[in-house]
């Protein structure tokens, strides 16, 4: 709350003689901003004696987030903003704030029957107001709040609870995740159209599809929300395949929570919006349509058509790989009175949907053990009478029910180490298609979490111990995939100074190139059962032979494509009594043979080519990586997806789809143009590179 003296100072700076001030003109060039964003008014801003502005009370105060009521009979304005209650009466140079009188140099006025307030009204609600008569700029600044520990951008899926403490169900962008985030009590919430000053709002004012900028505090809860949206006006030509096509050719994807309403406010079926003039509400980041306001009256029933139609097939809230026991919600919008099913190919499972309301079919599928889907767009079938139509889901779904595989435990279980500062860790690889969730990796030594000091990579975790005491030590490594499948390994090793391995060395005096030979020599106290050596990040468990009494030697010839820098050379020795011992050479080794890595590309079909009806997409890229691909079609203003899937890049740097793709589209035939898009994925499933080609096709075989 600002003091009376502060309010008086502002007013005196704006006016010379309050008693003589009379509004004289409509202000044509006055600019009003809130936190740097322009404010818009539905009534003109007035100038008083060409000295300072008067602002339309309701729009001005509501933009500041206040609830406003105007009583024309009593000539009284009431506004509330959080814990501030403001009351002003026409003709009085005072305002009542939370029951206390505040003096004003100029109070509430009316013109053409509408209430107007001076900028000082914003200060009564806790804002700063700065007026520059030279530039005619009025700057309103929100109350200072504690800076969030971090900011997070997300799409709002649902307001879980509108009353405090509220929670928001959101989908983040990088990485893509769906989760529920709690709001702090009294969190600052603002909402507005992109490019305008967002007004203070209630949590209940937030709408699904809003682009959220969330301020997250140190406790992990949200202390500020800035919501934005965009609007487009036009006439809908068609709704098909999760796409909204406008007259004029513009196309927008549909958000899975899209709501269509008529001019009377009642629900309108998606197919019923075709041919209608509409106002669209979209996400500023994704361009998805989440709200449709049509000129016609609402009708929740779909229009009757000669053939069944599917407007959209949604997988609501989907944003990550799903594991066993997790539930996937499904929704299909189309013709009414039919039977809808979803095919979980290649698993072969069919999920029946229920017609919850005319033309809206919903259901859920719980993932069973052993099921896997790798970036697959699900197929739905809608049968009305004897006619059937199919469509693909709006997103590609990944299902993974297998935990990652863990190997190369370092030091090996039950090893006896001569070295007191060994490397400790493990390698891992996901068995299913979801990849590794690096945030899940945890490494503990003797019950102490050392993950923050370790090197966590897509394939391994490693920690360099500084100095371990003689005796037994326990290691625990845990890793999970994004679907929540967890792998954990625990084992024990011992540090024993003066153990069986007395010395370990190699002969690399500098970097080794292709064809060079690395020789590793180990001295032991007594001959044993077995000996081997490893080159960190390159080779594991290479055999060592006993060349002389208590001396073991092993060699490795550098191959084309080998490349490691500052790698540890370690040896493992199994003594005659079966005990396992391990040591590391004091000198690191570097192998700099060039790596021949294919560039990521699409080689078939070529850009601009004409193919036959069937194609088998192919390309090149780094060996071992995964590629996600999709073929889309366009015919006149209609478009959609033909097929999609994933492929693994082989050792020769070549990838191709498992099966041929039939380009002929049901009910459409051959399209005017096709687009093949391929995305190179890292081990975490994130897109590293993207390539696309456009081509045409003929009816004949390819």
Image (spheres, grey):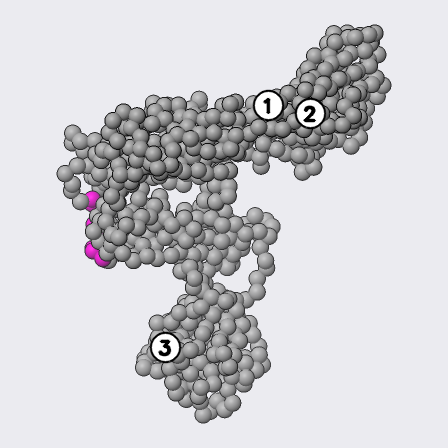
Query: Where's the N terminus, which quadrant?
Result: bottom right
Region rendered in magenta:
294-302
Q: Secondary structure at mark 1?
A: strand
19 vs 518: above or below: below
| CB contact under 8 Å: marks 3 and 1 | no
Which quadrant would residue 75 be assigned to in this image?
bottom left
Task: Give residue 44's mark.
Answer: 3
Compare marks 2 and 1 and give the one earlier in the sequence: 1
Indicate the quadrant containing the C terminus: top left, top right, bottom left or bottom right.
Answer: top left
How far apart, in angstroms, are the residues tagged by discs 3 and 1? 69 Å
Residue 363 placed where, x, y %? 32, 34
Comparing 488 with 502, the one in front is 502
Check disc 2: other Cα within 10 Å, few if <14, some if 14-19, many if 20+.
some
| Crowdedness near tag 3: few (<14), some (14–19) or many (≥20) residues, C-alpha within 10 Å | some
Tell me, yes or no, whether the highlighted magenta stretch contains residue 579: no
Whether residue 295 appears in magenta in the rendering, the answer is yes
């Amino acid at each position: 709350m600002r003091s009376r003296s502060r309010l008086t100072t502002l007013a005196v700076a704006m006016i010379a003689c309050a008693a003589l001030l009379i509004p004289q003109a409509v202000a044509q060039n006055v600019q009003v901003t809130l936190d740097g964003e322009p404010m818009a008014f539905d009534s003109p801003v007035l100038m008083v004696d060409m000295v300072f502005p008067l602002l339309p009370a309701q729009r001005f105060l509501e933009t500041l987030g206040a609830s406003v009521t105007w009583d024309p009979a009593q000539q009284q304005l009431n506004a509330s903003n959080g814990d501030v209650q403001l009351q002003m009466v026409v003709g009085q140079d005072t305002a009542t704030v939370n029951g206390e009188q505040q003096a004003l140099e100029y109070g509430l006025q009316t013109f053409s029957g509408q209430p107007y307030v001076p900028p000082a009204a914003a200060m009564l609600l806790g804002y700063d107001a700065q007026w520059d008569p030279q530039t005619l700029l009025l700057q309103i600044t929100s109350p200072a709040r504690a800076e969030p520990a971090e900011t997070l951008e997300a799409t709002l899926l649902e307001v879980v609870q509108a009353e405090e403490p509220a929670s928001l169900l959101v989908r983040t962008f990088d990485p893509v995740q769906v989760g529920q985030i709690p709001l702090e009590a009294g969190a600052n919430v603002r909402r507005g159209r992109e490019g305008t000053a967002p007004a203070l709002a209630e949590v209940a004012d937030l709408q699904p599809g809003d682009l959220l900028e969330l301020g997250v505090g140190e406790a992990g809860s949200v202390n500020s929300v800035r919501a934005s949206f965009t609007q487009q006006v036009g006439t809908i030509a068609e709704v098909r395949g999760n796409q909204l096509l406008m007259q004029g050719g513009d196309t927008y994807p549909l958000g899975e929570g899209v709501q269509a309403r008529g001019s009377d406010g009642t629900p309108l079926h998606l197919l019923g919006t075709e041919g209608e003039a509409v106002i669209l509400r979209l996400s500023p980041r994704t361009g998805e349509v989440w709200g449709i306001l049509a000129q016609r009256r609402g009708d929740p029933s779909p229009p009757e058509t000669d053939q069944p139609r599917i407007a959209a097939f949604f997988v609501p809230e989907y944003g990550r790989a799903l594991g066993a026991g997790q539930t996937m919600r499904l929704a299909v919008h189309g013709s009414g009175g039919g039977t809808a099913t979803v095919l979980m190919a290649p698993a072969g499972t069919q999920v029946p949907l229920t017609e919850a309301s005319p033309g809206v079919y919903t259901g859920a599928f719980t993932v069973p053990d052993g099921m896997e889907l790798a970036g697959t767009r699900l197929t739905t079938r809608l049968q009305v009478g004897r006619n059937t139509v199919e469509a693909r889901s709006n997103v590609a779904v990944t299902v993974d029910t297998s935990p990652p595989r863990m190997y190369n435990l370092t030091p090996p279980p039950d090893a006896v180490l001569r070295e007191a500062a060994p490397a400790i860790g493990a390698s891992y690889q996901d068995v299913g298609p979801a990849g590794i969730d690096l945030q899940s990796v945890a490494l503990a030594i003797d019950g102490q979490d050392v993950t923050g000091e370790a090197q966590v990579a897509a394939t391994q975790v490693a920690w360099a111990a500084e100095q371990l005491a003689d005796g037994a030590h326990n290691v625990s490594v845990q890793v999970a995939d994004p679907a929540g499948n967890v792998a954990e390994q625990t084992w024990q090793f011992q540090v024993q100074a003066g153990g069986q391995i007395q010395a370990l060395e190699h002969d690399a005096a500098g970097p080794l190139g292709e064809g060079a030979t690395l020789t590793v020599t180990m001295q032991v106290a007594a001959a044993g059962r077995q000996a081997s050596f490893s080159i960190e990040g390159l080779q594991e468990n290479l055999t060592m032979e006993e060349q002389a009494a208590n001396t073991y030697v092993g060699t490795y010839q550098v191959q084309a494509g080998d490349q490691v820098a500052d790698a540890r050379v370690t040896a493992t020795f199994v003594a005659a009594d079966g005990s396992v011992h391990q040591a590391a050479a004091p000198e690191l080794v570097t192998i700099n043979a060039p790596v021949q890595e294919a560039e990521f590309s699409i080689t078939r079909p070529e850009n601009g080519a004409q193919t036959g009806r069937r194609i088998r997409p192919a390309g090149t890229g780094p060996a071992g990586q995964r590629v996600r691909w999709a073929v889309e079609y366009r015919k006149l203003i209609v478009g959609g997806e033909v097929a999609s899937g994933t492929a693994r890049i082989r050792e020769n740097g070549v990838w191709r789809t498992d099966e041929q793709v039939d380009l002929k589209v049901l009910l459409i035939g051959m399209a005017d143009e096709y687009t093949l898009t391929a995305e190179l994925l890292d081990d975490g499933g994130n897109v590293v590179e993207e390539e696309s080609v456009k081509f045409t096709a003929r009816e004949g075989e390819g």
